[in-house]
Amino acid sequence: MRIGTEVIKGWMKSIALGGAVMCLGGLVLSGNTLTLEDAITEAMVRNLDLRIQEADHRIAGDSVELERATFDPTLFGEASWAEQEQDRDLYRSSSETGRAGLGVTRQLSSGASLTLRTDYVRSGGSRYDASLNQIIGADDLNHNSAITASIRQPLLKGSGSRVNLAGIRKAGKRLEIAGLDFRQQVLSVIRDTEKAYWQLAHARARMNRRESAIRLAETMLEETLIREQVGRATRLDVLQARANVASQQEILLDAGRQVEEAEDALAVQLGRLEAGVARRDFSVESLRPVGVEIPDLGSVWAGALARSLELSVQRANLEVLEEDLLLAKDEMRTNLDLVASASTTGLSQEGARTAYESALEKEGHDWQVGLEVSVPIGKRAAKAGLRQAESGIEREEFRLARMEQDLLRRVRDTHRVLTVGLQKLDAARLTLELETEAFEQQQQRVDNGLANFRDLQESQLAVDRAAIAELDAWLAVLFAEVELAELDGRLLDRHRIDIETRTGVADAG
C-alpha cells in the first residue's frame, strides 16, 4: 500500500512542477524545438498579412511617381494629307494639301503650361473661285513653316506651386501612412505570433497536465482495486475510480483539440496553413518566466503617446486633409488665365528646307496675348467642397482626440491586467501548493481508512483546477506583457527587430 501512495505523490509532484517540465516532448529533446525568435523571423518572411501590407506600400510609392509625372514633358505630333478635285462647266480644278506638326508641352509647378511646336504645310494646285468665276492658282507647290511658343498661366485659380504641388505632397503623405501601416502590421504580426506561440505552449502544458491527471487516476484505480481485494474499499469506490479515469480521458480529448487549434493559429501566423496538408506537430518552448517588475504607468503612457503608430497615421491623415482644404479654397477663386503666343513663319516655293530657313530668319512673324476668364455663377460646388473639407478636418481632429483617449484606456487596462495578473499568478501558485499538500494528506486518510474514495477524488479535482488556474494566470500575464510592450513601443526592441519602411523589408536578428 505504501508503494502505491509514493507513486501517487510522484505524479502530484510532477503536476506541481509547472510548464517547464510539461512542455518537454520528443522533438524538444531532439533539438528540433521551434523557438519564439525563429517563429517571429519566419512570420516576417511568410506572413500573408505582412505581404499584403508590403504591396500596399509599393503601390503608395508608385502613386508618388504618378503625381510627379504630371510635370513630365509630353511630346505630340500630327500629320494629314488632303486632295480635292472639282469639275465645273469647262473648268477643272484640283488641289492637294499636306500638314504636319510636332511639339512638346510641359506643365510647370507655377500652374503654367508651356508649348513649343512647329507646323509645316505643303499645298499646291488650282481651285475654282466663284466670285471671279474662274480657276485660280497654279501647279506650283507652296511650302509654309511656323515655329510657335505659347504659354497659359493661371493668375488666380490654379496659380502657384503650393497649389499645383499639393498632389505630390498628398501622395508623399500617403506613402508615409503606408510606411506607418506597414510598421504597425509588423508589430501586429510580432504580437500575434508571440501570443499564438505562448497559446500553443499553454495548450501543450494543459494537455500534459491532463495526461498526468489520467495517470494519477489510473494509479488511484489500481490502489482502489487492491484495497477492494483486502476489504478496505467497496464496489462503489471501484466504480467511482473507473468513472474518474473515463472523465479524465474525456477532458484530455478536449485538451488535444485545443492543442490542434493552437497549432493552426500559429501556422496561420507563419504562413504554413495549407489545404490538404497533414497536421503540423509544432514543438515549442515551455512557458517563459514572467517579469517580476511592473513598469511605471506614467512611463508606459509617455512611451505609448510618443510611439503610437495609430496616432501618427491619424496626424498624417490630417495633413492630407489640410492639402484638400488648400485645394478647396483654390476652387473658390476665379478662373483667370493669361494666354500668350509668338510665332515665326516662313514661305517658299522651293521646298520645306527653304521654308524653315525663312522662318528662322524671321521673315514672317505674329504674336498674340490675351486674358481668359470664367466664373461659375454662385460657386455652389466650390462652396460645398470647402465646407466638406473644413468639416472633414474638424471630424478627424475629434477622432484624433478620441484615439488618444482610447489609447490611454488601453494602456491603463493592460497595465491593470498585468498588475492583477501577477497577483493572481502568485495566488494560483500558492493555491496549487496547498491543494497538492491537501491531496497528499487525503491520500494518507484513505490509506488509514479515515476517508472514502469520493473525498480523494474531490481533492484530486481540486488539484487539477488549481494547476489549470496557474497555467491560465501564467498565460494572461504573458499576454499582458506582450500587449503592453506593443503599446509603449518596446516590442521591436524586445525581439531585436529593425524595420526599413522605405523598402518594406523587416529584418530580424
Image (cartoon, rainbow, N blue to C red):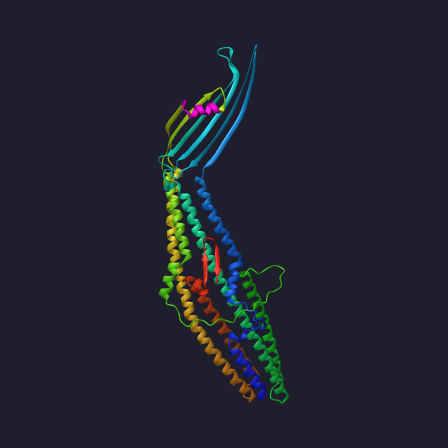
Up the image or down, 55 lies above or below 30; here it is above
Horizontal placement of 76 versus 228: left or right? Answer: left
Residue at 59% from the left image edge and 79% from the top image edge: 215
Q: Main secondary structure of the magenta part?
A: helix
Q: Which residue is drawn at 41% across and 30% down?
A: 149
Can see residue 28?
A: yes
Magenta highlight range: 353-364
How many numbered marks appear?
A: 0
Q: Nearer the viewer, residue 234 or 316?
A: 316
Report whether 40 appears left or right of 488: right
Residue toward you, 192 or 251: 192
**Front-lying residue, 99 or 282:** 99
Q: In this view, does 301 lie above or below 391?
A: below
- Residue 483's place in the image compared with 106, above or below, is below
The quarter of the displayed image where residue 46 is located: bottom right
> In which quadrant of the rendered image does the N terminus lie?
bottom right
The picture places residue 35, in percent across and down from the top left corner, at 52, 67
- Image check: 263 left or right of 334? right
Which residue is nearer to you in this view: 297 or 439?
Answer: 297
- Residue 391, percent across and down? 38, 47
Residue 173 in the image: state x and y as whole percent.
42, 49
Residue 366 is situated, as x and y percent measured from the top left of the image, at 40, 24
Is residue 143 on the magenta stretch? no
Decide whether residue 355 is among the magenta residues.
yes
